[in-house]
Image (cartoon, rainbow, N blue to C red):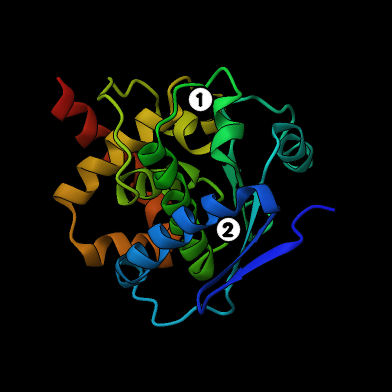
Amino acid sequence: MLFNKLFHSEYFNIHYEPENKELVELLSGVLLAEINRIMKFFKLTELKSPKEIFLYAKTEEYAKHISRYVTQYQDWMVADTYDGNIHILSLDGCRSTNAHKKMEQDAYAKIIIHEFVHACQQEINPNAYGCQWFWEALATNLSGQVYADIPVLCDKEQLMFYYESLPDQYPISYHIGKYMLEKYSHEKLLEYVYEPEKLREDVEEILRAVKETSE
C-alpha cells in the first residue's frame, strides 16, 4: 500500500513510503525553513488546512497519478498540485528519468518550494485561466530556481491560452517573473494574484516591456 507513513506538522503533512524516510527529513526541513517567507509574500497568516504532500517512491506510481490530469505523461513531470494537494516524485525517482538523471539534492529541494508557492496561490485563487504563465513565473522565482534568459518571442494569445504548447515555457515564465519582481511593487504583484482579470488586461503591456529589455 502506498503512503503508509505520515510526517505531521502545523502547515503540511507528508505521506510517504518507508524507503523515503530520509527524504522526508530533507523536504520537511526545507519547507519549515521557507514557509514563513512564502506565506508572507502572499500575505497569508494561515492556511485553510494543512497541505497534504504525497511522496512517490517510483516513477510508475507518479506517472499513474499525473496521467489523470495531462494528455500524456512526460518524464520531466515530477511534481504537481492539480488536485489541490502536492504530489512529488522521490529524488531517486527523478534521477531514474532522462530529463532529471543528473538532478542534485539542492535542485530537488527547490521543487517542493515551487509546489508550495503554487499551493499558497491556490489558497487565494484556484482559477488559472489565462494566468498559468504567471503562476509559474512566481513559483520559479520564489523557489530560487534559475533558468537561462531567453528571448520571449510568444504573443499574448500564445502566453495566455497555449502556454503548455510553448517551447521553453518555464524559462519564459522565469524571465518574465524576474522582470516583474524587479520592476513591479509587491502590492501590484499581489493585485494580480487576487484579481487575475487585471493581470489578463495587462499581459500585452507586460510582454512588450519584457521584450524591450531583451532587445
What is the residue that sits farthest to the right in this orientation? 1
Helix, strand or loop at disc 1?
loop
Q: Position of residue 192 (x, y in %)?
A: 36, 60
Q: Is residue 92 above or below residue 11?
A: above
Marks 2 and 1, how far apart in space?
29 Å
Which residue is nearer to you in this view: 22 or 147?
A: 22
State which quadrant residue 141 falls in: top left
Q: Which mark is residue 138?
A: none
Helix, strand or loop at disc 2?
loop
Q: Amino acid at mark 1?
A: His
Q: Position of residue 92 (x, y in %)?
A: 57, 33
142 left or right, relative to 52: left
Callout in the foreground (2, 1): 1
Q: Earlier in the sequence, mark 2 or mark 1?
A: 1
Which residue is nearer to you in this view: 12 or 182?
A: 12
Q: Is residue 38 visible?
A: no
User: Residue at horizontal 33%, vertical 65%?
Assistant: 33
Which residue is nearer to you in this view: 165 or 39?
A: 39
Quarter holding the C terminus?
top left
Q: Which mark is residue 127?
A: 2
